[in-house]
Image (spheres, rainbow, N blue to C red):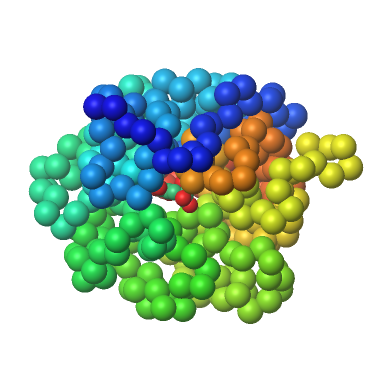
Amino acid sequence: MEFQKTPGWLDWYPNPSKPRFQVPAGSVDAHCHVFGPGAEFPFAAERKYTPCDASAGQLFALRDQLGFARNVIVQATCHGADNRAMLDALVRSNGLARGVATVKRSVSDAELEAMHSAGVRGVRFNFVKRLVDCTPKAELMEIAARVKALGWHVVIYFEALDLPELWDFFTALPTPVVVDHMGRPDLAKPVNGPEFELFMRFMRAHEHVWCKVSCPERLSVTGPKALNGERDAYRDVVPFARRVVETFPDRVLWGTDWPHPNLKDHMPDDGLLVDFIPHIASTAELQRKLLIDNPMRLYWPPEQ
Ligand code: 0GY
């Protein structure tokens, strides 16, 4: 099937620069996606955007080029609850990728078990209104209870303004809860202000909540322009991400977000994104926790 990309869609960066920061051996890119290819894995009828193709092979080439060892592939909304492209990527990874699926209440136990065998370890609940039509909370809670039995967690994607309304639902979830992109803070507001403090309080009060300190390219107001002639893009995001990493070093994850859906102004050079890491995790110990220990604990725990 032929798909026309959403007008103005930006394709992923073709030749990322070599990062100056060398990630430690065994690092995990804990947030990335595959798109199609549409001819093989059609995009969902209910999607809000039609992306470019971004295949498993292209993702694994990026992994190798940036020096990462493993991926966590998160089901993107353009595939709805049809997880075939993500599951195919898990199989192709030879055990070097885990997955986060999107499922409906109608999913069978056998389907969940097959996903587990393929490497899925979580489901994603998305509350970003431009990306999805919302699913009733009772339905999501029912799904959470079922995946808890498999030892999975729930990944949540929401915007900072919606946290007060969603707080009680999130804290009632029976599994570990992983927040995408720091709950999308508004970078025009101060890191010490009430909005980001509410997010910090959310994490402080609930030890089952983890955070991806990802997507500076999505959050930044100052953008990719390097200041001082250095590879220091997205510097305005540093105080936010650094605060989360230093306050909750055992509950943070990092990911590229390749192939970067829905960016309007620029497409990031993934090499520059890797060079962002030492600004937010400034010691070897913090880097090891962020890139290896934490994602391995969540996605590749020792067999029980
Ligand atoms: C991200 C962010 C976005 C999109 C999706 O599944 C998706 O479509 O997650 C976004 O548009 O902010 O994590 O990739």
User: Which one is in front, 78 or 23?
Assistant: 78
Asked if residue 156 can be seen in this view, the reply is: no
| Residue in the image at 52% along x and 26% along y | 63
Total count of labels: 0
In the displayed structure, does residue 263 sit left or right of residue 241?
A: left
| Quadrant position of the N terminus in the picture | top left
In the displayed structure, does residue 38 sit left or right of residue 155?
A: left
Task: Tell me the quarter of the picture where residue 13 sits.
Answer: top right
Q: x and y percent of residue 222 in the render?
A: 74, 53
Is 30 located above or below residue 4 in the figure?
Answer: below
| Residue in the image at 25% along x and 64% along y | 135
Is 88 located above or below residue 172 in the figure?
Answer: above
User: Which one is in front, 236 or 222?
Assistant: 222
Residue that lies at the very extreme toward the right in this rendered image: 228
| Quadrant position of the C terminus in the picture | top left
Asked if residue 94 can be seen in this view, the reply is: yes
| Residue in the image at 55% along x and 70% along y | 199
Q: x and y percent of residue 249 in the render?
A: 60, 55
| Residue in the image at 16% along x and 57% along y | 105
Q: x and y percent of residue 300 in the render?
A: 40, 39
Task: Tell me the quarter of the picture where residue 130 sits.
Answer: bottom left
User: Which one is in front, 130 or 170?
Assistant: 130
Q: x and y percent of residue 46 in the render?
A: 25, 49
